[in-house]
Image (cartoon, rainbow, N blue to C red):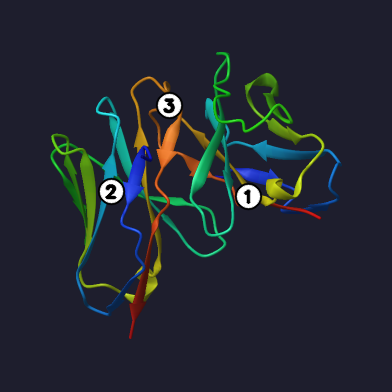
Amino acid sequence: GAGVSQSPSNKVTEKGKDVELRCDPISGHTALYWYRQSLGQGLEFLIYFQGNSAPDKSGLPSDRFSAERTGGSVSTLTIQRTQQEDSAVYLCASSKGTSGSGTQYFGPGTRLLVL
Amino acid sequence: RKEVEQDPGPFNVPEGATVAFNCTYSNSASQSFFWYRQDCRKEPKLLMSVYSSGNEDGRFTAQLNRASQYISLLIRDSKLSDSATYLCVVRSPNAGKSTFGDGTTLTVKP
């Protein structure tokens, strides 16, 4: 079946502009995660959605970052007033299990470059 | 101290070699453990879950030591295609947040 999809695959923007990154999880997966991976670094947790529960936003690095998940499916990560240090690959993952116990399946990521 | 720490690597081994990676975690309440594999410029993919009793999948063996709070991954008879970065993942109970290690890079050479 279809895996996790993300769009755009690449995004180049100018410092100070806002960007929106989209994630379509696997159908039926109740949990959705956003991570950030800088070049040569590990994955940094950003935010986690589980069903209708309040999201775990503990990983968002600043108030310029926000995310929402509409209808328990598609999610959008928004970065306002982008900075050069926001340049990274933004990865979305979804899982089937409750309480975050399921295997996470990752999308191909969005490569963001802030000039 | 990081929540999850891995051997920094890189590991450069010849084909056919056996190689082992370790990963330590700081939260004793952690319940779920995984090894993911990430190829260059690709997304991470699950390699295997790690069970308390240890588990094997072909040439790959994962072990968990709760007392010492570490997990390991053993790769036997290394193949060129095993070259990748291996990520250790730890998840706490009833928490969606997963903590990833920074990864260990393996290069298998002919």
Callout 3 amino acid: Gly
Residue A108 on image: x %, y %: 60, 52
Q: Which residue is mark 3?
A: A100
Secondary element type, mark 3: loop
Disc on the earlier residue, 3 or 1: 3
Residue extending farthest to the front is B1
Residue at image location 33% in from the left, 52% down from the top: B6
The crowd level at tag 3 (other Cα within 10 Å; few <14, some 14-19, many 20+) is: many
Callout 1 amino acid: Gly
Q: Which residue is mark 1?
A: A109
Residue at image location 65% in from the left, 37% down from the top: A24
Residue B22 on image: x %, y %: 25, 53
Residue B35 on image: x %, y %: 34, 49
Q: Which residue is mark 2?
A: B23
Q: Are marks 3 and 2 on the same chain?
A: no
Q: Locate the C terminus of chain A by quadrant.
A: bottom right
Q: Are marks 2 and 1 on the same chain?
A: no
Q: Is residue B26 above or below residue A108?
A: above
Secondary element type, mark 2: strand
Image depth: mark 2 or mark 1 in front: 2
